[in-house]
């Protein structure tokens, strides 16, 4: 909560002018805060007489923090393979572990996953914890969470990372709540502060308009989910050596209230825009779903896939699995062609790591041109047919 020392306040109004939310005003010679306060701290930083303070109510300070050591990755096994985000987490986890001078471990739950241990070691892990059981063949939120919770309690890692996927977003909040630990979701950047080992977790905030760095200094483990495709996996090293440890699962860990009747893979969900090298994306500038006929044709000619902005998805022109951006997927293709997309920060945060960005838009001042490698100011309904025709001519 924000507290104000009335005897110190000089009614200078610097706090009022620095508040972006209209949460603080000067009344009767003293600053007054209302319900719109977000505890951003801008007013505290700008107060020249230090009359404002942020007080954390009910803060828990863990007494055994020094017992926690090491970085742990929660890996995902899906459809017969390790999910790519797991290797991305091992890439950043290796960097964090080396900077901290600690070991990097990975937990892999599943029905029959022991054969992947060497692959995870080659990807950077010092130790692989294998949790195998028949009940783990199908994802059950309560069991997977209990398995991770058991391993954390036994191994006491200081940092736990998971992908910001459907599984990671289900399991990590469950475990963080059970452990009364801090959790930052959808991180796009991670660093270790050398002096105290605090994990600096960066993620978009306020609708993607700013990047916030979050700390969890008083509890362990420090937990974070990381967006797929924002971290680079390390180059595999088959010569690496590491431990392979079988987790002895407790009986209570395997208790579940979930019955999986069937597992069905939706055809739409097979559009894996995060794993292709070329994406052609359409936005509000298409004006209707008919525009995606051209988008799909161009994507086909380039051997790529179709992506979209949130505006196109919200308009019902294309299903959600194609959405790129803060509320969609983060992609990192070699070529990203943005057609009729303005390039607002909410979309840019999901595709700005593409190697080459080509923007096609009628508005020469659209923000997308600020991040584009090449820009075409023109009507996409005129540009795309010519581009498709040229590609077809080259193939002949």
Image (cartoon, helix red, strand yellow):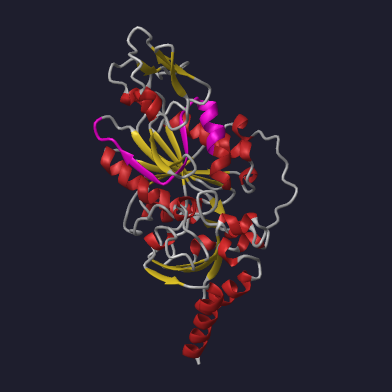
Residue positioned 41% across, 28% down in the render: 220
Where residue 17 appears, x then y in whole percent?
38, 28
Q: Quadrant of residue 284?
A: bottom right
Quick one: 102 or 40, which is closer to the camera? 40
Residue positioned 42% across, 58% down in the render: 367
Where residue 374 appears, x then y in whole percent?
38, 70
Looking at the rendering, the stretch of residues picked out in magenta corresponds to: 172-195
Where residue 224 appears, x then y in whole percent?
45, 39
* 386 lies above or below 36: below
Residue positioned 34% across, 24% down in the render: 14
Q: Quadrant of residue 41?
A: top left
Q: How many marks?
A: 0
Q: Quadrant of residue 193?
A: top left
Extreme-bottom residue of the structure: 396
Quick one: 31 or 85, which is closer to the camera? 31
Residue 185 among those drawn in magenta: yes
Where residue 175 appears, x then y in whole percent?
53, 32
Residue 31 among those drawn in magenta: no
Extreme-right residue of the structure: 261
Extreme-top residue of the structure: 7
Residue positioned 47% across, 53% down in the render: 344
Extreme-left residue of the structure: 195
Q: Is residue 351 visible?
A: yes
Q: Is residue 217 visible?
A: no
Asked if residue 293 lies left or right of residue 329, the reply is right
Quick one: 269 or 66, which is closer to the camera? 269
* 54 lies above or below 83: above
């Amino acid at each position: 909560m924000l507290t104000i020392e009335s005897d110190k306040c000089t009614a200078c109004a610097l706090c009022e002018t620095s508040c972006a939310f209209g949460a603080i005003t000067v009344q009767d010679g003293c600053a007054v805060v209302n319900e719109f306060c977000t505890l951003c701290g801008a007013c505290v930083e700008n107060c020249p007489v230090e009359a404002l303070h942020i007080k954390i109510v009910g803060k828990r300070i863990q007494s055994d923090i020094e017992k926690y050591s090491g970085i742990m990755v929660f890996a995902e096994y899906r459809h017969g393979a390790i999910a790519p985000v797991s290797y991305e987490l091992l890439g950043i986890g290796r960097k964090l572990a080396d900077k901290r001078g600690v070991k990097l471990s990975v937990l892999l739950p599943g029905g029959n996953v022991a054969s992947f241990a060497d692959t995870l070691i080659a990807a950077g892990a010092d130790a692989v914890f294998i949790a195998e059981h028949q009940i783990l063949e199908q994802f059950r939120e309560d069991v997977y969470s209990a398995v991770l919770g058991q391993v954390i309690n036994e191994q006491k890692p200081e940092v736990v990372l998971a992908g910001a996927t459907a599984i990671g977003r289900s399991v990590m909040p469950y475990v963080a709540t059970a452990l009364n630990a801090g959790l930052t979701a959808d991180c796009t950047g991670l660093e270790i502060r050398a002096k105290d080992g605090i994990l600096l977790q960066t993620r978009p905030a306020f609708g993607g308009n700013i990047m916030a760095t979050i700390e969890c200094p008083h509890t362990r483990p420090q937990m974070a989910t990381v967006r797929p495709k924002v971290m680079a996996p390390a180059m595999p090293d088959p010569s690496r050596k590491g431990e392979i440890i079988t987790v002895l699962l407790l009986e209570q860990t395997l208790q579940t209230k979930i019955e999986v009747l069937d597992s069905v893979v939706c055809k739409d969900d097979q559009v894996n825009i995060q794993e292709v090298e070329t994406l052609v994306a359409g936005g509000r500038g298409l004006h209707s779903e008919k525009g995606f006929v051209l988008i799909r044709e161009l994507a086909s000619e380039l051997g790529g896939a179709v992506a979209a902005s949130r505006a196109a998805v919200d308009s019902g022109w294309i299903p959600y699995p194609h959405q790129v951006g803060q509320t969609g997927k983060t992609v990192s293709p070699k070529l990203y062609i943005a057609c009729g997309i303005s390039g607002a920060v909410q979309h840019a945060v999901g595709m700005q790591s593409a190697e080459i960005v080509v923007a096609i838009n009628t508005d020469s001042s659209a923000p997308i041109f600020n991040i584009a490698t090449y820009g075409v100011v023109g009507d996409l309904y005129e540009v795309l047919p010519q581009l498709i025709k040229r590609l077809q001519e080259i193939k002949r």
